[in-house]
Structure formats: C-alpha cells, structure tokens
Amino acid sequence: MAAPSSCKVVLAGTIAKSLLEEVQASLKALQHKPKLVGFLANSDPAARMYADWTGKSCTENGFDFELREVDKEELEEAVIAANSDKAVDGAIIYFPVFGTRQDQYLQQLLDISKDVEGLSHKYIFNMYQNVRFLDDAKTQKSILPCTPLAIIKILEYIGVYNSILPYGNRLFGRTITVVNRSEIVGRPLAALLANDGASVYSVDIDNIQHYTRGEGIRMSRHHSVDTDLKVEDVVPKSDVVITGVPTKSYKFPVELLKDGAVCINFSSEKNFDPSVKEKASIYVPAVGKVTIAILLRNLIRLSQNREGKPASN
Amino acid sequence: MAAPSSCKVVLAGTIAKSLLEEVQASLKALQHKPKLVGFLANSDPAARMYADWTGKSCTENGFDFELREVDKEELEEAVIAANSDKAVDGAIIYFPVFGTRQDQYLQQLLDISKDVEGLSHKYIFNMYQNVRFLDDAKTQKSILPCTPLAIIKILEYIGVYNSILPYGNRLFGRTITVVNRSEIVGRPLAALLANDGASVYSVDIDNIQHYTRGEGIRMSRHHSVDTDLKVEDVVPKSDVVITGVPTKSYKFPVELLKDGAVCINFSSEKNFDPSVKEKASIYVPAVGKVTIAILLRNLIRLSQNREGKPASN
C-alpha cells in the first residue's frame, strides 16, 4: 500500500487565533471599548446566523455588539442615525434586504468611518488602485474587504507570501487561480493578489481573465485582460488554487492540480473532494473564522482612525 | 521608459552573516577552541587561494587554523597522523593533488570524525538515502557537503523553503532546475532538494534527469529517472534555477525563465547575464561566503560530536 500523502491541512481557527491575539493587543491600546452595530432587516435564517455569529465573536473578544432589528423601510433612517452616533464605531448590514440594487444604495449609505466590512466605494476604489492609505500623510490605512483580506492573511500564514521580498511585491513569481469573480470576493481578491505581484487567473463561468502587474511587475498596480484560456490550461501551472463556488454540486477538478499545489476554499460548500489531499501540499478547507477575525481587526482600525492613532501594520 | 524591474539581489555575505552568528553562539558553548588543519600538496594557485581564504575565515571567526604544506608523496601519512591527533577537530585537503583516482583515495582516507567538507562515503551515502543522523539514538547529525548545504541554507533564507510544512517536506510544490550534475555539488544538491520534497530537473550536457519523491511525495527519499526533456521544456515551469557551469563562455538562456523565478549561481563564473534581473524575483549571484560559513558550521558539528554534545538543529 502506498504511504499516505503529505498534505498539511490548515484550519481557519488556527490562523484566526494568531490574528485575534494581535487584535487583543491593539484593543488594550485603545482608549475606549469599540462597539459594532448589526442591522438585521430580513428573516433570512443565514443572515440571522451570521448576525448571531458576529455578535458572539464580538463579545467573546471584548467588543460591544448591538443587534438592531428594524423594518426594511426603516433601515435607511437607522443607518443615517448610526452614521452620526458617536457611540457606534462600526456597523454591518446583513444582506439581502430588498434583494435589488437598493441594497447597494444601503451599503454605500453607511459612512466610510463606520464601514467595518470595507465595502464602501472609496475603500474598493483604493483597493483596485493599490492605494493603501486614506490620507496623504499615510497615517490612516484604508480598510480592505473582509473575505479577500482574510484570504491574504491565510496566504501570509501558510508561507505563500515571501517576506524576504519588499512589501507589496511578496507574491512575485507565484501563479494563482481564483475560481469566483464576484464583486464581493473573487474580483477584489484577484486584484489584491496581482497588486502584490502574483500572476492571477480569475475564472468564472464565462471566461478566464489574467491579472498581473506586467513582466517584471513593473506597473504600480494590476491590469487585467480577457483570455481564451481554459481551466485545464491554467490550473496545472498554478501554485495556489482558491475556490468560492456557492453550489453544492460543484467540485473542483482535482486531477488538474500540480503536485504540491496550495488549495483554499472560501465557499460555504465543499468545493474540493477529500482527494485534494492526495495532491496538495497545503489545504485550507474553509476561511470563515479568519473572516470574523478580520472584521474585528477592521473594527479596531476604524476605532484607531477615530481616535486619531497612527496606523500600525 | 519602463519602470525598473523588481528583482531583489541577495548577496552571499548577507546570508553568511546570519549563519556566522549561529556559529558564534555554538562556538561559545563548546569546551574547547576547534582547530582546522588544511593540507596543501600542490602548487595550484586556486588551491592556495582557497587555503588562504579558509585560514582567514577560521581566525576571523575564533577558530584555530594550521596549514600543513607537504609533499604529494607524504600526504597519505600526514592525513593518517591527523586522523588520530586529538588536537585536530577537522581537516581539509586542497585538491587536486595527483589529479587522478588517487585523489578519491586520499579523500576517503580522512576519518569521518574529521571530515569537515562532508565528502566521506558514509556522509554521502546518508545524504542520498535521506538519513539525517549517524546513530540510532539520533544524537549525532550527519555532515552534509558544504556547497550543496550552503545552497539549501540560501534557499531557506530567501523563503523558498516553506517553514509551515513539516521538516523534510518544505520544498513540496516547488519545481527546481539545477544546471550541473557533478558528484561534488550538482547531483548531491538535486538529491537533497528532492529529498525535501521538490521536483528537480538535473541538467547536464548529456540529458535531463528528474528527481522526485513521487506523486504526493509518498516515498521517503528521492528517486531519479532519465528524461527526453530539453532545457526549454523544464526552465519555463521552474520556480528556481540554480547554475554551476565552470565555463566563462556559458550563459544561461535567461529568456526561458518564467517571470519571477529565483536564480542562484554557484559557479565562480557569471552564468547569468545582468539581464536576469529583468525577469527574476530574487537573484543570488554567488555563494562562496555561505560555503565558508557552512564549513565552519560543520567544524562546530564535528567538535560537538567529539565532545558528545547532543545535536542541535
């Protein structure tokens, strides 16, 4: 019988632990206890579960959390009130509310100084443009969206970022496939990875886009091009494969992986069969706990920005 | 005009420095000052230069060094005498002496307890077999040949080894091309890298061999197979290219490198044109200073083995 494979399974909880220790240290240095407000205006059980989970994570880690259950039609006023409420450090709206474009209006309504999820246009713009600070003096760091940043923290933890390279170039030489091109996770993630120097293939149902900073990563930020490439062209040369397909029946074609690839799944569904462990060097089956840790980290950052503290890393 | 490329040039001196600091710490813990003896039995200016360089490195770092210049015909007796001389911790013979198979006899004549270069058959056997200790109790670490080990230390320093993976599997997922298959550096290096989990292409003038531990690195040590592959097949998929071609006119075909590859040259000739910096993420132009640091590290290890100290990492 063959020896077992050598895949190292890394659980999100392990990575979250080290991030939460950093969060604790930053929390102690603050002059006040940060408060997160959650707005629940629907009866979606998944949204309520996420709300309960954020609440539990907040209180367990020394943050205040208040769930404000409001009617859909009252949400706009409730968000406006929170925007100017000095007692509120951060807020999160559990979507879908209307399930239409009106939800984007609500998201953008939240003031950027309270946007703990990093979904405001200003933050998204800075992310795509590779702008890391809010001010010219570089004292206030821009907030990054939780799940893409969680995946970056995972890649740092598992050694895909090379810390001997200069900050901002630490993925130079890495080829990464991202299966998902949503505006919330997949596309921002591809952009962030390419901004850090990677060659990124962004896969969705229509086509594959290639995000890079050009040969020798000479450009200051990524550009992307449409390609005629297929999954079977890009996966065999990918050092890292990151999936986020929210479909129970979808399974990533593990047989295409190169031996020793790093595999990360951020979908709530299991995009990889257990056979992924026969080929991968490192497998991260889920990311949720890291995303929550990043949410708290963003809340710290918003609180620091409000207290006028200089940004730390 | 295009922005400059983003290649980080890492000098051997920088890496040697951190190794020499470790050597200093280990030196302080020893009960005696280790002594290295060099045997010079030829008039080759390169051999004398190497002898002078080892002597200088020894004295600068707190080791005793004694150069014993002997006639070729007296070398055998001189080595036998050093083998049983309690005042000698390590010895090195500057080759070529006869320039024939007799040189191998002289190399093997040196007792393994004094073989600072790690060239004794026992050490070489352990290296190829992936045996890390001399004894069953695992208190005495086997000595590795200086230049291959120097290159491994360089790969650790520049982040090619992934320290989140278990010791012995830290190159799983990496593809490495080694251009040189000498018995002193190229072949042992390919074996060491494959033993640590890499997929290694070993290039010499005749063919390309592939060294791996099999799919999922299930085997406990490498095996190698001859291939019909060409340099243009293996270089574009290599994360790391290591060259050691001792020919002034030889230049590695930089145009085949994948963007962001890591390039290391261990030849005394410059195997890479300066244009390598247009494509590489990290370039290490020479390794000599690290090799000397490893020589001193091996001397420490031999001294520890003699004092019966348990092996540290």
Image (cartoon, coloured by chain):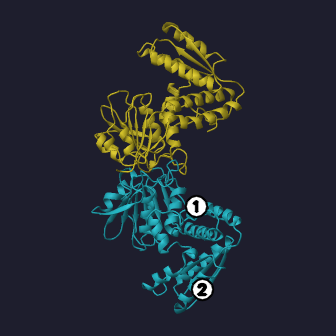
Chain colours: A cyan, B yellow
Q: Position of residue A166 (x, y in %)?
A: 50, 50
Q: Position of residue A145 (x, y in %)?
A: 51, 69
Q: Are marks 1 and 2 in contact (CB under 8 Å)?
A: no
Residue extending furthest toward the front: A136
**In the rendered image, the vertical position of residue A218 relative to residue B181, given as above or below:** below
Q: Quadrant of residue A14?
A: bottom right
Depth check, front residue: A304 or B286: A304
- Secondary structure type for disc 1: helix
User: Which amino acid type corresponds to the residue marked 1 in the rendered image?
Assistant: Ile
- Secondary structure type for disc 2: helix
**In the rendered image, the vertical position of residue B212 relative to residue A183, given as above or below:** above
Residue under the point 45% across and 69% down:
A125
**In the rendered image, the vertical position of residue B11 relative to residue A250, given as above or below:** above
**In the rendered image, the vertical position of residue B111 relative to residue A114, given as above or below:** above
Q: Residues within 10 Å of mark 1 (few under 14, many from 20)?
A: many
Residue under label 2: A81
Tell me if B44 is positioned left or right of A115 in this view: left
| Residue A99 seen in this snapshot | no
Residue under the point 58% across and 61% down:
A15
User: Which amino acid type corresponds to the residue marked 2 in the rendered image?
Assistant: Ala
Residue under label 1: A15
| Residue A26 seen in this snapshot | yes
* Res A167 label: none
Quadrant holding the C terminus of chain B: top right
Mark nearer the N terminus (1 vs 2): 1
Q: Chain of mark 1?
A: A
Q: Quadrant of residue A206?
A: bottom left
Q: Residues within 10 Å of mark 2 (few under 14, many from 20)?
A: few
